[in-house]
Image: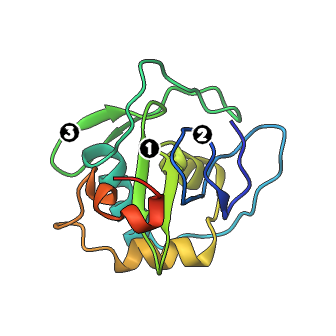
């Protein structure tokens, strides 16, 4: 499912979030390098703190891989069936967990404001449902 970067998140009936990383094989995307530390933190979020888990797997439309990602604690998770949500300055970003694969395997570079949000995130206090407390940003509890 394609949603242009920094557009309103429209995948589920949740208002107020901003989409990043909803890529499609039918659309070009921005490429560039991402700092290894930022990718590692985003990977840990995708594996350990994802949300909105789905029943099926969405394969990468660029290589059709079913990506398995293992984090530093030996936890493995199949990507393509959940989302990563994180706070930014006055917004909440919603991404597919495949964003980790898109960055690592296909050179996708998310917008700078998103990378800054990943960098600034306190991983230890952010949980997969932490956005629920951000009802002013999401329009619901």
Q: Position of residue 81 (x, y in %)?
A: 44, 30
Labelled disc at residue 75? 3
Q: What secondary structure is found at the residue carrying circle 1?
A: strand
Q: Residue at x 76, y 56 (%)?
A: 29
Q: What secondary structure is found at the residue carrying circle 2?
A: loop
Give residue 4's quadrant in the image: bottom right
Q: Mark 2 touching mark 1, by CB under 8 A?
A: yes
CA gap, disc 3 and disc 2:
27 Å
The mark lying in front, picked from 3 and 2, is: 2
Q: Is residue 1 left or right of residue 68?
A: right
The mark lying in front, picked from 1 and 3, is: 1
Between 11 and 70, the one nearer to me in the picture: 11
Q: Please give the residue where the numbered disc 2 appears in the rendered image.
A: 11
Q: Residue at x 35, y 42 (%)?
A: 51
Is disc 2 surrounded by few (<14), some (14 to 19) or many (20+) residues within 10 Å? Answer: few
Q: What secondary structure is found at the residue carrying circle 3?
A: loop
Between 53 and 25, the one nearer to me in the picture: 53
Q: Is residue 80 above or below residue 94?
A: above
Q: Is residue 61 above or below residue 19?
A: above
């Amino acid at each position: 499912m394609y949603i242009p970067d920094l557009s309103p998140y429209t995948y589920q009936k949740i208002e107020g979030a901003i989409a990043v990383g909803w890529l499609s094989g039918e659309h070009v995307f921005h490429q560039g390098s991402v700092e290894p530390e930022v990718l590692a933190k985003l990977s840990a979020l995708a594996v350990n703190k994802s949300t909105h888990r789905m029943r099926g797997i969405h394969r990468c439309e660029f290589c059709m891989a079913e990506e398995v990602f293992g984090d530093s604690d030996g936890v493995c998770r199949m990507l393509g069936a959940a989302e990563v949500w994180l706070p930014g300055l006055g917004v909440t970003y919603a991404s597919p967990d495949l964003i980790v694969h898109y960055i690592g395997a296909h050179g996708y570079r998310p917008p700078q404001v998103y990378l800054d949000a990943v960098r600034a995130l306190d991983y230890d206090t952010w949980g997969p449902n932490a956005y629920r407390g951000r009802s002013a940003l999401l329009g619901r509890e």
